[in-house]
Image (cartoon, rainbow, N blue to C red):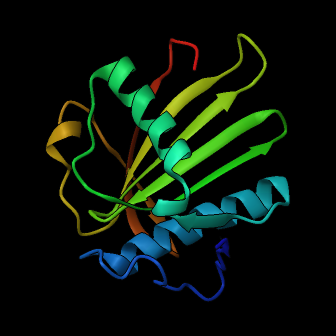
């Protein structure tokens, strides 16, 4: 069941089990606003159980590129292609959001981004990363980091 994320009326639907559900919902809404404003497309997530292939693909990149295994269970995911870029994303119970920018054209930009919801600690598996802070009207303070993907997936 696809759920189009509304960034004007932020909802915790699908994220209720997170201890930082409101902040995670704001982070999800912030992502929806970005895609709507930049690309003019709806941002529609699905429950993790319906996105096993997308989540496995993201986890494979994390494992093969940096040896990272996310401890928190995924709650929702998205996988869309816009302007020749694949944009999968996963929202985790801990408040972590991971998105991948994967240009389909060979030699294009490819990176993994991590965003931490306000109120969550940096997960142990991401302790090697430095996180920058960003203010968001929807999500409060977002801490983010990234790495460039070197392999082909």
In the depicted structure, whether residue 74 falls above or below residue 11: above
Residue occupying the far left of the picture: 124
Q: How many marks?
A: 0
Q: Position of residue 108 (x, y in %)?
A: 71, 18
Residue visible at 23% across and 38% down in the picture:
126
Question: Within the image, what quadrant is residue 86 found in?
Answer: top right
Q: Position of residue 16 (x, y in %)?
A: 36, 82
Q: Position of residue 14 (x, y in %)?
A: 46, 78
Residue visible at 20% across and 30% down in the picture:
128
Q: Is residue 76 visible?
A: no
Q: Is residue 112 visible?
A: yes
Image side of residue 83 versus residue 132, left or right: right
Image side of residue 77 versus residue 33, left or right: left
In the foreground, 111 or 77: 77
Q: Quadrant of the C terminus?
A: top right
Q: Position of residue 11 (x, y in %)?
A: 52, 86
In the foreground, 37 or 43: 43
In the foreground, 90 or 50: 50
Residue visible at 60% across and 24% down in the picture:
110
In the depicted structure, whether residue 150 falls above or below residue 58: above
Q: Quadrant of the N terminus?
A: bottom right
Residue visible at 68% across and 59% down in the picture:
34
């Amino acid at each position: 069941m696809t759920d189009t994320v509304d960034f004007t009326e932020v909802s915790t639907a699908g994220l209720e089990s997170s201890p930082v559900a409101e902040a995670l919902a704001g982070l999800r809404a912030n992502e929806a606003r970005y895609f709507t404003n930049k690309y003019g497309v709806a941002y529609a997530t699905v429950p993790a159980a319906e996105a096993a292939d997308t989540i496995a693909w993201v986890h494979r990149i994390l494992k093969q590129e940096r040896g990272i295994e996310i401890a928190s269970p995924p709650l929702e995911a998205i996988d869309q292609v816009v302007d020749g870029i694949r944009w999968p994303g996963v929202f985790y119970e801990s408040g972590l959001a991971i998105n991948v920018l994967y240009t389909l054209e060979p030699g294009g930009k490819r990176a993994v981004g991590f965003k931490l919801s306000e109120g969550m600690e940096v997960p142990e598996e991401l302790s090697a990363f430095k996180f920058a802070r960003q203010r968001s009207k929807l999500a409060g303070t977002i801490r983010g980091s990234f790495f460039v993907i070197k392999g082909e997936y």
